[in-house]
């Protein structure tokens, strides 16, 4: 999200406000997504049923991660002849009894739910080969006179019908080739959103170029943009992240051209090239380069300090991966990026408010391939959605502290990352809403050179890891 100051603001402040608040809203997403570490696996369990009294049913889940760092939770949806205490069905994971459901104490053949906790040791043994055989064995008291799920009218002679969702947490460093690649695609999707070039600068009065760099513990970001006055432009951005789970690098170069529409709007097209590399602590390495192309627009809304921008890009990627066991593979892919943003400025006596909202969507697809060990890896895709709503604030200081501006902000960020493997929805990463708070200052040293310092708390309200950190930055306009 790129917040902009009005046209009376010096050129250097225009660029710095845009860069500062952009990273305030999106840089934490990568930090939090990686420091949270493990990925939440939410795997649908298909519906099966039995038509015999005291019957059995079986289903097999394939392509699942091969390790877990927690117990599993099996949320069961069922219907059947389960009104009495003797009417139950046992559940087995690869032949190991993990619990039962039934004995509703109410009417027969009504939709019910139950939750079974699967011990980590049992779940780890079941998924070690990348699949789980789940079987159900009803007691002899479970008779076959129920209808279809969820209604028992008309009767279909079923003793029970069952489906559900299996949830557990898998370390990203040991989830097998498909999941390691999915983690790479998810990281690249986040980085693609976070490193998008600023196009609002073409309509908010800025004319020069700029360079910005920012560092914090385990992370660095840089941004170089050409002058904004002409219809042809270029930008280079990048980031690197070092966490307990591995290292990530991302670089993006963009070039574009546009034409003026009306008083203060532009429509154009851009071409982007990027490179991403993930190295996990277990030695798994995945990298890829690609391109995207498509239209963009930016406009000022009326005579207000309110700006809108959007883009729609399509591209392809060329990737390679290698594992500690020596297997390696190359795969291609297609991807889409769509984003819309709205940002503004509200000047008040002694302070300025900077509201804004960004909505972004990325779909990154991996083609099926066969690795060097002759193992077939199914096609998969990652869909990443990010919605960020924030309010920044700037308070200039007077007197001996003239030249300093206190900066801060609060943001609410909702993200949703979904994996589809072999055409089936498989995994959800880093779902939910989190909050972020920032507080810092900016100092103008003159001649277009400025410095920044900032502390932040990210991950508030997420129920997962909370990141506390600090950043230092330098900015130069030209």
Image (cartoon, rainbow, N blue to C red):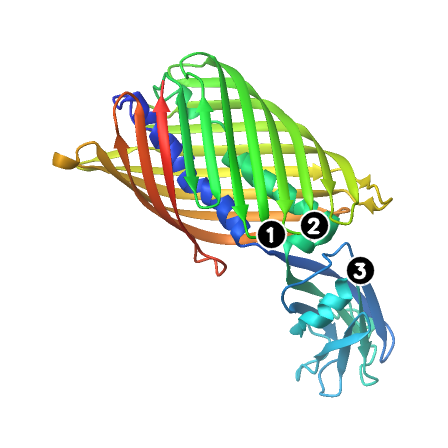
Residue placed under numbered mark 1 in the picture: 429
User: Could you tell me which residue is drawn at 69 percent across and 74 percent down?
Assistant: 110
Q: Is residue 456 left or right of residue 42?
A: left
Is residue 327 shown above or below 262?
Answer: below
User: Could you tell me which residue is drawn at 66 percent across and 82 percent down?
Assistant: 106
- Between residue 422 and residue 52, name the one nearer to us: 422
Label 3 sits on a secondary structure element that is: loop
- Between residue 103 and residue 283, name the one nearer to us: 283
- Between residue 264 and residue 195, name the one nearer to us: 195
Label 1 sits on a secondary structure element that is: strand
Residue 318 lies, in percent from the top left, at: 71, 31
Is residue 120 shown above or below 378?
Answer: below
| Of callouts 3 and 1, the N-terminal one | 3
| Dot 1 crowding, Cα within 10 Å, few <14, some 14–19, many 20+ | many
| Of callouts 2 and 1, the N-terminal one | 2
Q: In which quadrant of the rendered view does residue 95 lie?
A: bottom right
User: Could you tell me which residue is drawn at 82 percent across and 42 percent down?
Assistant: 371
Distance, label 2 to label 1, CA atoms, is 11 Å
Residue placed under numbered mark 3 in the picture: 129
| Of callouts 2 and 3, the N-terminal one | 3
Residue at far left of view: 399
Q: Quadrant of the C terminus?
A: top left
Distance, label 3 to label 1, CA atoms, is 22 Å
Q: In which quadrant of the rendered view does residue 121 lie?
A: bottom right
User: Could you tell me which residue is drawn at 70 percent across and 38 percent down?
Assistant: 365
Residue 62 appears in the picture as rendered = yes
Residue 153 lies, in percent from the top left, at: 76, 69
Circle count: 3
| Dot 3 crowding, Cα within 10 Å, few <14, some 14–19, many 20+ | some
Distance, label 2 to label 3, CA atoms, is 14 Å
């Amino acid at each position: 999200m790129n917040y902009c100051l009005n046209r009376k603001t010096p050129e250097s402040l225009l660029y710095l406000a845009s860069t500062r608040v952009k990273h305030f809203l999106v840089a934490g997403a990568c930090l939090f997504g990686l420091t949270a570490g493990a990925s939440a696996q939410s795997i649908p369990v298909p519906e099966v049923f039995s038509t015999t009294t005291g019957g059995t049913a079986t289903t097999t889940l394939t392509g699942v991660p091969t390790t877990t760092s927690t117990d599993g939770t099996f949320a069961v949806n069922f219907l059947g002849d389960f009104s009495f205490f003797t009417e139950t069905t046992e559940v087995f994971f690869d032949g190991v009894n993990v619990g039962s459901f039934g004995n509703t104490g109410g009417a027969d053949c009504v939709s019910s739910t139950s939750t079974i906790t699967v011990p980590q040791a049992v779940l780890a043994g079941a998924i070690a080969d990348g699949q789980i055989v789940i079987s159900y064995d009803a007691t002899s008291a479970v008779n076959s006179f129920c209808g279809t799920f969820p209604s028992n009218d008309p009767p279909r002679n079923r003793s029970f019908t069952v489906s559900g969702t299996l949830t557990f947490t898998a370390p990203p460093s040991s989830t097998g080739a498909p999941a390691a690649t999915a983690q790479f695609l998810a990281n690249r999707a986040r980085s693609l959103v976070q490193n998008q070039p600023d196009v609002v600068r073409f309509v908010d009065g800025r004319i020069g170029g700029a360079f910005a760099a920012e560092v914090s513990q385990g992370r660095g970001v840089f941004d170089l943009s050409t002058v904004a006055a002409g219809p042809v432009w270029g930008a280079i951005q990048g980031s690197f992240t070092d966490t307990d789970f591995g290292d990530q690098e991302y670089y993006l170069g963009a070039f574009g051209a546009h034409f003026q529409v009306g008083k203060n709007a532009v429509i154009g097209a851009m071409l982007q090239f990027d490179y991403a590399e993930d190295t996990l602590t277990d030695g798994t390495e995945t990298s890829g380069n690609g391109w995207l192309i498509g239209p963009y627009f930016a406009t000022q809304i009326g005579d207000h300090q309110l700006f809108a921008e959007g883009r729609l890009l399509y591209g392809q990627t060329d990737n390679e991966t290698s594992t500690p066991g020596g297997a390696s593979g190359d795969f291609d892919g297609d991807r889409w990026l769509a984003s819309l943003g709205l940002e503004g400025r509200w000047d008040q006596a002694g302070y300025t408010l900077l509201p804004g909202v960004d909505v972004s969507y990325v779909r990154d697809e991996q083609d099926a391939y066969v690795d060097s060990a002759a193992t077939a890896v199914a096609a998969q895709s990652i869909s990443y959605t990010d919605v960020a709503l924030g309010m920044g604030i700037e308070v200039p200081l007077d007197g001996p502290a003239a030249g300093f501006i206190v900066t801060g902000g609060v943001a609410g960020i909702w993200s949703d990352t979904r994996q589809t493997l072999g055409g089936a929805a498989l995994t959800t990463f880093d779902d939910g809403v989190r909050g972020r708070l920032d507080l810092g200052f900016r100092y103008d040293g003159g001649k277009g050179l400025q410095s920044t310092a900032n502390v932040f708390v990210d991950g508030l309200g997420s129920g997962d890891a909370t990141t506390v950190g600090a950043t230092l930055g330098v900015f130069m306009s030209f």
